Amino acid sequence: MRKTFLLILICFFFPFYAISEETFLSLKKGKVNVRYGPSFESPIKYVYKKINLPIKQIDKKENFRRIIDYKNNSGWIHVSQLKKTNSIIPMTDKILFKKPSYFSNPIAKIEEGRLLIVQKCDDKWCKVKSGKYKGWIKTDNIWGSIN
């Protein structure tokens, strides 16, 4: 009887655990309002002006998502302004390579904080685009998800 009750409790609360899991998303638009609370009546805290910026969802309430960015700014954004992640930000300076190997030709130096659009990933490397450059970077020390 006690095991059955415990199993029912676990099954009941597990969906809430899965919903509150942190996930990475990207900004869909070039201008996105971040609010103090999860409603349109809540005042605007600040405005993002960078399309594809990766952010981490840390909570949700109805159609709003509480987010945090790579500089630890947080607030609430409406779900219509977000999309599945497609970008990363390196947290340290990196080298962009022609192929996914340290023995490949280096193409450019990517500075910490630069927005990179992910084209595809393979093991511990991602093919990214940044401005006029395309190449591969190692995926250690990045902000964002490569999945």
Image: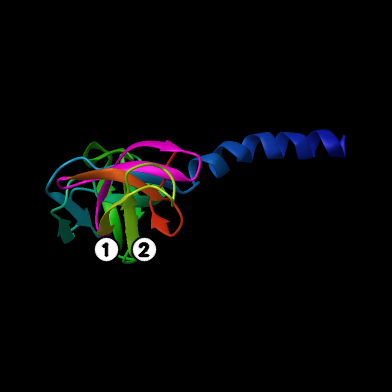
Mark 1, other Cα within 10 Å: few <14 / some 14–19 / many ≥20: some
Report x, y in % for residue 131. 15, 48
Q: Which residue is mark 1?
A: 111
Q: Earlier in the sequence, mark 1 or mark 2?
A: 2
* Residue at point 40%, 56% (across, down): 142
Q: Nearer the viewer, residue 109 or 90?
A: 109
How many numbered markers are drawn? 2
Residue 138 in view in this figure: yes
Query: Which class describes the residues within 10 Å of circle 2: few (<14), some (14-19), or many (20+)?
Result: some
Which amino acid type corresponds to the residue marked 2 in the rendered image?
Met
Picture disc at residue 146: none
Residue kind at label 1, given as amino acid type: Glu
CA gap, disc 1 to disc 2?
Answer: 9 Å
Give the magenta part as a residue range: 110-132
Question: Splitting the image into 4 quarters, where does residue 117 fall?
Answer: top left
Task: Please say whether residue 37 is visible from this viewpoint.
Answer: no
The residue positioned farthest toward the right in the image shown: 1
Residue pictured at 43% horizontal, 50% vertical: 103
Which quarter of the rendered picture does the N terminus lie within? Answer: top right
Residue at left 62%, top 40%? 13
Label 2 belongs to which residue?
A: 91
Q: Is residue 113 above or below residue 33?
A: below
Residue 109 image position (x, y, % from top left): 27, 60
Give the overall secondary structure of the magenta segment: strand
Disc 2 secondary structure class: loop
For the residue pair 26 and 121, the one nearer the viewer reads as 121
Give the image location of residue 18, x and y in percent: 54, 40
